[in-house]
Image (cartoon, rainbow, N blue to C red):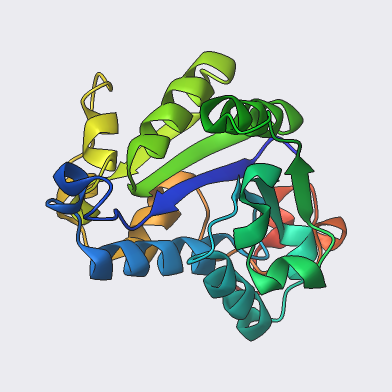
Amino acid sequence: MTDAVFLSASVPDPKRCPHYAQTADSVAITAAVSALIYVTLGRRLLVWGGHPAITPMIWSAAEALDVDYSEWVKLYQSNFFEDEFPEENKNFRNVTYIEKFDQDLPKSLLAMRTQMFSDYEFSSAIFIGGMNGIIDEFDLIQALQPKASIVPILSAGGAALEVAKHLSEVSNDLINDLDYISLFHRHLGISFKEQRYRRPSEQPVDIKQRYRPNA
């Protein structure tokens, strides 16, 4: 699937990364993640490295939108964190677990991310909030999938601000626009007219055939 969307997001921990936490707006991060979920679910495949704070949010949204969470959301997790996996992981067959490298966290994360960026072709990569991991994921997706559109949500702060420094151009709406739903519709090229489908297999290949009748 060539129009998969990659999500890199977290709320910075002030103890682990105080410099990223200082600029982060946790309310804006949550709002941006929620908006991305609303815009993509049932329309585009969403892929990410599962995070215990955000996985339950995506699962709840999928239930509310009546789409098949296990089909539209693909998670990758390193077994380095097996003691911290969200309960939702047990309910669905949409998680790819990558073996850890002994007790080496950097190598374990690199293996997981390399597999994730090799399994799918991404049209866009969204960066919201975050800490050092966001920088690592940005660097790797740039190396492995340079054609993916990079969308850092600067209004939410965090490590996404650092991502923007590596881009030749940044759209002003990524800095100022807090209407995240409209923002993602624009940057992901997803029309408001597009219907949601319970499973990807039910979605027409031709985008115009996905539009609501009389839209």
189 lies left or right of 5: left
What residue appears at the point 44 percent right and 69 percent down from the top-left corner? 34
Relative to the observer, which residue lies in front, 2 or 26? 26
Relative to the observer, which residue lies in front, 63 or 81? 81
The quadrant where residue 41 appears: bottom right
What residue appears at the point 79 percent right and 69 percent down from the top-left corner? 90
183 lies left or right of 34: left
User: Which quadrant, please, contains the N terminus?
Assistant: top right
Q: Position of residue 10 (x, y in %)?
A: 39, 54
Furthest residue in direction top, as rendered:
143
Give the vertical position of 137 relative to 75 (above or below).
Answer: above
Q: Position of residue 199 (x, y in %)?
A: 81, 64
The quadrant where residue 5 appears: top right
Q: Position of residue 167 (x, y in %)?
A: 28, 22
Asked whether residue 211 is in view, the answer is yes
Relative to the observer, which residue lies in front, 60 or 215? 60
What residue appears at the point 51 percent right and 38 percent down from the top-left corner? 124
Give the vertical position of 163 relative to 167 (above or below).
Answer: below
Q: Position of residue 155 (x, y in %)?
A: 19, 53
Furthest residue in direction bottom, as rendered:
64
